[in-house]
Image (tube, helix red, strand yellow):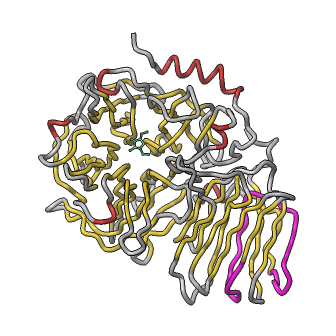
Amino acid sequence: MTKFTTKKANEYTENHKNKVDKKFYPKFNFAAPVGWINDPNGVVVYNDELHLFYQHYPYDSVHGPMHWGHAKTKDGLNWEDLEVALAPDEPYDKDGVFSGSAIEKDGRLYLMYTGHIGLDNGEIRQVQNIAFSDDGIHFEKYDNNPVISGDDVPEGSSIADFRDPKVFEKDGRYYAVIGSKTDDEKGQVLLYVSDDLLTWEFQSVILPYNKFLGDMVECPDLILFEEQDAFLLSAMNYTDKETGEYFPHISWLIEGKVDWDSHVFDINSVRKIDGGFDYYAPQTALSATNPNEYTAIAWQQGWNRTLPTHDRDHNWAGQMTVPRVLKEEKGQITQYPSPKLMNNISTVSEAQNIDLKKSYQSEFTADYIQFTMDSIDQLKLTLKNNAESIVVDFDRENQVIEFSRKETIEITDSDGKLFDDISYSISLEDTPWDVEIFIDRSSIQVFVNNYYTLTSTFYTENLLDKLVLESSTSGTISDVKIGNFWSEDEGD
Ligand code: FRU
């Protein structure tokens, strides 16, 4: 008898979701009804709704044998939980239904995911599998799984670390980019091709190793625009050679262009997708109406971090970011908070200009604040209560945004290293900064000029209900607007 099934997971969820302690639970970011989540999977527009599958272990607030949880939304804000879609119940995925993606073909929704297998000798194998559904809710695994296994991996590449297929269509053919590493521990991305989503062939090493790819690529996603293309991907064990700074996990946005003759991606530029503590494994869905637009959701959490919801037995852990829309504009990839989300904001305080000769203080119980820094070079924004606070410092002169969660519940890695302060260098000289900020119960997401973002969790004993704005220089911030999504009792 198999240990895990979707039936068992769904029964468990039904019986335990009311045991979740909601003290830190998000109001508008997506989180699981109960248990652990990590990467978003299978982000796809299906029948006019955005579907989100996710790495899920319902039975505890830690990573365990992975399932795929499932939810959908019309507006990126109100999420409807659906049944757990996949459980690790077959020999080819017995130790975890790892990350993957979704695509619609002839009305049928296909999922492509990694089966994680521990062999008796302690070695790992990772293979790629397919499941499908005609109602978008109940999934059947394909009889001939796996569809890509170690035999299809090119010479010199790992058959143990080979995961997270992201499938897409181009010119009537299907392609999957898959995270990989070479036998000598260098991250890379492989490309596979198929005509029917069931039979796959190796095509190329589409993104060969470069110094940003660390020793393994996870969750690669390739998005295609008119002028250029971009990889969103996460890399493990990357060290910045210039500063010596080491990142066990980091997510990059790599702009360039696929050469469809050689099937190799030519790189133009590389940047961190996000400058905060908690942004990993983003995945996109192609817009149903605009081939030049994608919606991205990321896991708003980092690996190897203490999690207050787990430490306090709240029975849930991990949340997602708000959906972002990625577009190509003037040769650059821009990131907007999803317009559907913005349509749901009701204004609490209309646009006003605030003169910061003296600091500004007000009560604050909102979800959203926006403003423009044009005449002012530096702004310190604090959200606080009597004992706790978070601070975002916008420094136009030094082209840096700094986030501090020092005065909140401590977050460390397993060695006790504190993660309480982070700075993000940006490059927006001689231009006003248009700032938008989303504040949820335990997270903040900052957008600057729809290009740079900073995303971080924070945990406070009590709500932060005061806003303080201060500046070391005098001047005005303009168009300050404060807004709310639905109030708690209206939410459904
Ligand atoms: C990234 C990741 C993926 C893997 C999944 C397992 O966060 O490690 O590479 O498929 O999580 O849960």
227 relative to 19, above or below: below
Q: Is residue 475 visible?
A: yes
Residue 456 left/right relative to 460? left
Snapshot quadrant of residue 145: top left
Residue 418 left/right relative to 471? left
Residue 388 at x, y percent in the picture: 79, 58
Instruction: Look at the image and tell me in which quarter the C terminus lies.
Output: top right
Q: Residue at x 47, y 28 (%)?
A: 85
Q: Residue at x 26, y 46 (%)?
A: 174
89 relative to 343, above or below: above
Determine the residue located farthest toward the front in the rendered image.
Answer: 415
Residue 250 left/right relative to 392? left
Residue 127 at x, y percent in the picture: 27, 35
358 relative to 65, above or below: below
Residue 363 at x, y percent in the picture: 87, 63
Closest to the observer, 59 or 7: 59
Snapshot quadrant of residue 95: top left
Give ligand 1's quarter of the image: top left
Closest to the observer, 265 or 47: 265
Q: Is residue 102 visible?
A: no
Whether residue 274 is in magenta: the answer is no
Please count the marks in the image.
0
Q: Residue at x 59, y 36 (%)?
A: 32
Whether residue 358 is in magenta: the answer is yes
Determine the residue located farthest toward the top in the rendered image.
Answer: 1
167 relative to 130, above or below: below
Q: Residue at x 48, y 21 (%)?
A: 6
Q: Which residues are magenta?
A: 354-379
Residue 317 at x, y percent in the picture: 60, 39
Determine the residue located farthest toward the left in the rendered image.
Answer: 155
Snapshot quadrant of residue 61: top right
